[in-house]
Image (tube, rainbow, N blue to C red):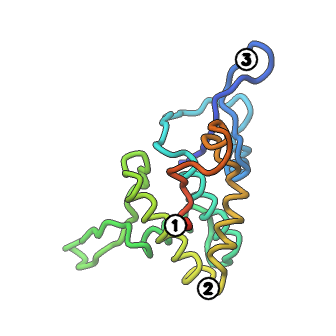
Amino acid sequence: MVKLVMRKRAGQTGEVGLFVDSEIFEDDFSHIKLGAEINVEATTPRSLRQLKFAWALATKIEKGCDWVDSKEDAMDFMLIEARHFRRIYDPLRNVAILKPKPTNFGAMDGTEYTRLLKRLVHVAVTIMIPGMDDAALIAEIEAMVGPDMKSQAEGGGHSKDRPTPHRDPR
């Protein structure tokens, strides 16, 4: 299953459609054949920018690590290392399996989600790509995600609930 973030907007005259507005999801979208029927479950998460940030981080890790096969694998590994997992015990084989919790970011409150994002960035710079500067990584991912539309609509500046994991408290 492929997760894409799309925006509903007007296309050509008289047309309205769902469009990929972020380069992060363009590769997955390009694999869908033109005219193909697809099953879509449309949801609107609490903070779409935070969701884009998390998947942009997974994409960056996938490109930076040769031992990660896909961005989904990178996300699963980061979630497990960030301790966002369920432990499933199989008594028959006497084995415990760690399975990442679903990233239903819409169900998480803002504080919980921001904490998870901080842990994901920490995992990325300490385990996945050691030695990388976290501020540089965050700046690069924010450039991939694009501007915060909410703060631009309010007249510029940063929104109060800025989704980046590290924020200067000053």
At mark 1, the secondary structure is loop
Rendered location of residue 88, percent (x, y): 27, 68
Image point (37%, 47%), residue name: 107
**Residue for badge 1:** 169
Three-letter code for the amino acid on which mark 2 is drawn:
Pro
Decide which of tag 2 and tag 3 comes sooner along the chain. Answer: 3
**Residue for badge 3:** 15
Mark 2 and mark 3 in contact? Answer it, CB < 8 Å: no
In the image, which disc is placed on residue 3? none
In the image, which disc is placed on residue 130? 2
- Give me the C-alpha separation between circle 3 and circle 1: 44 Å
Three-letter code for the amino acid on which mark 1 is drawn:
Pro
- Give me the C-alpha separation between circle 1 and circle 2: 26 Å
Can residue 17 be seen here? The reply is: yes
Mark toward the viewer: 3 or 1: 1
Is residue 144 shown left or right of residue 167?
Answer: right
Can residue 166 be seen here? The reply is: no
At mark 3, the secondary structure is loop
Three-letter code for the amino acid on which mark 3 is drawn:
Glu
Mark 3 and mark 1 in contact? Answer it, CB < 8 Å: no
Image point (75%, 13%), residue name: 14
